[in-house]
Image: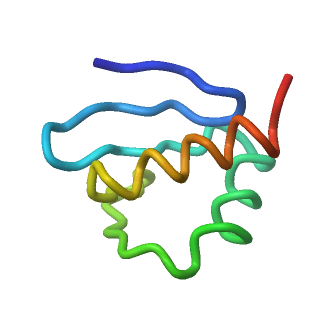
Amino acid sequence: MQTTLNDFIIKDHGSLVGFYPANDTGCKWWKDNTTKVRQRKKGNVYLVKRLASRDIITGIEKDLED
């Protein structure tokens, strides 16, 4: 499943969720807000465990509302 949320494309990969910053705003938000989150970067996607993804999505919605 794939969804677009503000400045990110988010893809469900089972136990991991992929966050693809869609623009400079998304890249800056990710850099500023996810320093303490365990993540793996593969190419242009940041992979995080499903449980952590919920907090990230909440933060994106709060900080980057359209």
Query: Residue placed farthest to the left in the image?
Result: 14
The structure residue drawn at horizontal position 33% and vertical position 56%, both measured from the top left corner, is 47
The structure residue drawn at horizontal position 80% and vertical position 47%, both measured from the top left corner, is 25
Vertically, is 29 above or below 9?
Answer: below
Vertically, is 12 above or below 57?
Answer: above
- If the image is split into quadrants, where does the N terminus sit? top left
- The spot of residue 14 in percent (x, y) is 14, 38
- The spot of residue 12 in percent (x, y) is 27, 32
Q: Is residue 19 left or right of residue 47?
A: right
Dividing the picture into quadrants, the one containing residue 41 is bottom left
Vertically, is 4 above or below 26?
Answer: above
Q: Is residue 15 left or right of residue 40?
A: left
- The spot of residue 16 in percent (x, y) is 22, 49
- If the image is split into quadrants, where does the C terminus sit? top right
Dividing the picture into quadrants, the one containing residue 34 is bottom right
Q: Is residue 19 left or right of residue 60?
A: left
> Which one is nearer the viewer's eye here, 56 or 45?
56
